[in-house]
Amino acid sequence: MMDFDLTQCQLGSPLALARGEHLFQMHDAANGELYYVRSGHIKLYQQCPDGVERIIDFVQPGDWLGVDTIGEPERHASALALTDCELDLVPYRQLAELMDREPYSCDLFSAMLSREIERQQIAAATLRSAGACQRIVLFLLQRAGKAPADPAEEIHAALPMSRQEISDYLGLTPATVSRTLSLLKRNGWIALGQRGFVVQSREALEQLAAGMPLTEVPALA
Amino acid sequence: MMDFDLTQCQLGSPLALARGEHLFQMHDAANGELYYVRSGHIKLYQQCPDGVERIIDFVQPGDWLGVDTIGEPERHASALALTDCELDLVPYRQLAELMDREPYSCDLFSAMLSREIERQQIAAATLRSAGACQRIVLFLLQRAGKAPADPAEEIHAALPMSRQEISDYLGLTPATVSRTLSLLKRNGWIALGQRGFVVQSREALEQLAAGMPLTEVPALA
DNA sequence: CGGGCCCTTGATATGAGTCAAGGGTGGTGG
DNA sequence: CCACCACCCTTGACTCATATCAAGGGCCCG
């Protein structure tokens, strides 16, 4: 089945968001508004009663935002731009009209929601059974995306969130995240920049993600 | 918004499943078949390459099954009946036809999928930040369902899965689950039967679920 | 009645959390 | 433009929760 393609359907109106701006806040009216992320990174989080923030997800280019609030009156989380973003605002009503007119579009939309459910299920089940190192490497691989055609090519990926935010998201502490990243770096598998990283050995990361224990590799002479 | 109500729509064909039977297995053709669970309990799990099984979810009466595989050719998990079950088999095609004919039905279906995404997100985020006791109590409260009208009434809930399965699902070990349940029992907050339990103090459980630390309560003289 | 499996419980090991100090980076104001 | 300051990141020592290993007990099934 082909992917649900917005541009093909002429849906949505463009919307820019600057770093640090909220797209919406918890308890805002949802109004059946969905968003498609063209560029930039957004964090979805809840402000818990005790003041701690709980991170629901990091939204990347190509992801949809708001599919968890169709038919709900209120947003159940806040969305904050971690970088400047370009979005398409897509009212659900517009999609519904399309689905009335266009056969298959309903199937495509259902399939998109369905994939999202699957993604959440798998992610949750994986994280539950994984240790700290595995969680972090899986997170990094998610950020890095698919392997490039040329395996020798290095992959630069953005990491626009703080260590605190990463650790919240993974159910760890900032200290553990920092330690693990440092060890991955010492082993020469990634390079760390201020707001990003470079995959230097995807193979090593994939072995770690598959459950290989993480040990310090002695430096070559 | 009202709930998506199958009985009202005259959809689906009934289907019985005996304890121990598989409804489907991983990699089976999905054929766009959804199921609505009328009674009984089903576990959704993946058989990992290393032989360990990873539990995705426990499905209860009132839940839908298969909403994670709409538009996918294959099941990505196996479904096994933990008890005898009564299901309704609902082909997605039938729902799609309904959505063509009936205004709003499409919205109801989208809303149902959307709620499922939300449910997964919240559950995952909660489990990540919770310790062993909190996870277990949240799990028990999920099984027990809503509080009864009469607060004094005791709630009997089914627990048709093994400790091994519970611990897999929660990302713990059977030993930890057993210990924690024993402690809850010693404190008089639950009673344990072979294949079920009774909530004796919902208040205590809800405090634990909200983060109260679990300590042994000395027995009264 | 016997056997196997799962559940329970104890002792010990270990991975991750906590607490705390030091260092780098980016932002701000002089 | 530079200097200061605040915040976050890193790193170390120690603690604690949970996993691991292992033995005993109870339930269900044959």
Image (tube, coloured by chain):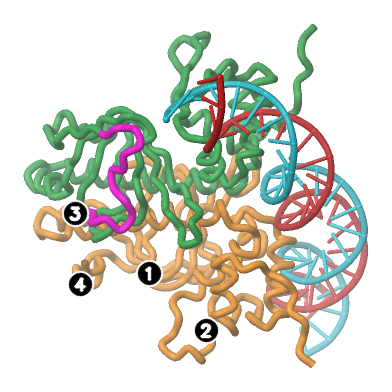
Chain colours: A orange, B green, C red, D cyan
Q: Earlier in the sequence, mark 1 or mark 4?
A: 4
Q: Amino acid at mark 3?
A: Asn
Evaluate whether label 1 is on the same chain as label 2: yes
For marks 1 and 3, give the CA distance: 27 Å
Q: What residue is shown with label 2?
A: A155
Q: What residue is shown with label 1?
A: A62
In magenta stretch: residue B118: no
Closer to the camera: disc 2 or disc 3? 3
Of A137 and C21, nearer the camera is A137
Which chain is indicated by disc 2? Answer: A
Q: What residue is shown with label 3?
A: B31
In magenta stretch: residue B19: yes
Place residue A188 in its image quadrant. Answer: bottom right
For marks 1 and 4, give the CA distance: 15 Å
Q: Look at the picture and state if B63 lies above or below A122.
A: above
Magenta residue span: B17-31
Q: Earlier in the sequence, mark 4 or mark 2?
A: 4
For marks 4 and 2, give the CA distance: 29 Å
Evaluate whether label 1 is on the same chain as label 3: no
Q: Amino acid at mark 4?
A: Gln
Closer to the camera: disc 1 or disc 2? 2
Q: Dot 3: few (<14), some (14–19), or many (≥20) neighbours within 10 Å?
A: some
For marks 3 and 4, give the CA distance: 27 Å
> On the rendered image, what quadrant is the N terminus of chain B found in?
top left
Which chain is indicated by disc 1? Answer: A
- Whether residue B89 appears in this view of the structure is yes
Q: Amino acid at mark 1?
A: Gly
The reply to whether callout 1 and callout 4 are in contact (CB within 8 Å) is: no
Residue A93, given in percent of the width and then of the height, sits at: 22, 51
Element carrying mark 3: loop
